[in-house]
Amino acid sequence: MIAGNAAYYSRNFCNETHHQNHRPRGVELMEFNGRMAKAFGEYVLSNLLLILLCLAVALILFSNLTERFATPIAPEKLAKLSRWILPLVGLMIIAQLIDYLV
């Protein structure tokens, strides 16, 4: 009789309430993300524009300051640097290829 009562309760109460309140997890996440996008969408966009504006201002300041206060490089030092540039670029390409393939 106990087993019969347990089956009755589990069939009529537990499963019934489970099916009424149960939704797949993905549906809940989509609804939550939709609410969050509606609630915070304008803030995210304004933050993104603020970050882009700060980066643009920093780039303009950096380029102006480097043009104004840069010292010219001696031809000997430039020749030394250019001797190392191509082998290092080739080494970086090979390293990236190995990283991509492995």
Image (cartoon, rainbow, N blue to C red):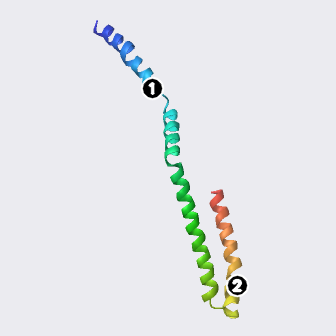
Callout 1, which amino acid? His
**Which mark, by number, is residue 61?**
none
Corner quadrant of residue 49? bottom right
User: Does residue 13 sit above or below 95 in this rendering?
Assistant: above
Left or right of residue 69, residue 40 in this image: left
Image quarter of the N terminus: top left
Q: Residues within 10 Å of mark 2 (few under 14, many from 20)?
A: few
Image quarter of the C terminus: bottom right
Q: Earlier in the sequence, mark 1 or mark 2?
A: 1
Q: Nearer the viewer, residue 39 or 88?
A: 39
Left or right of residue 14, residue 54 in this image: right
Q: Residue at x 41, y 17 (%)?
A: 16
Label 1 to label 2, Cα distance in Å?
Answer: 68 Å
User: Does residue 47 sit above or below 26 in this rendering?
Assistant: below
Callout 2, which amino acid? Arg
What x and y, as percent, mark residue 45? 56, 54
Left or right of residue 36, residue 66 in this image: right
**Which mark, by number, is residue 83?**
2
Q: Residue at x 70, y 93 (%)?
A: 75
Determine the secondary structure under disc 1. loop
Q: Residue at x 55, y 68 (%)?
A: 54
Between disc 1 and disc 2, the foreground one is 1
Left or right of residue 37, residue 9 in this image: left
Determine the secondary structure under disc 2. helix
Q: To which residue does mark 1 refer?
A: 22
What x and y, as percent, mark residue 90? 70, 72
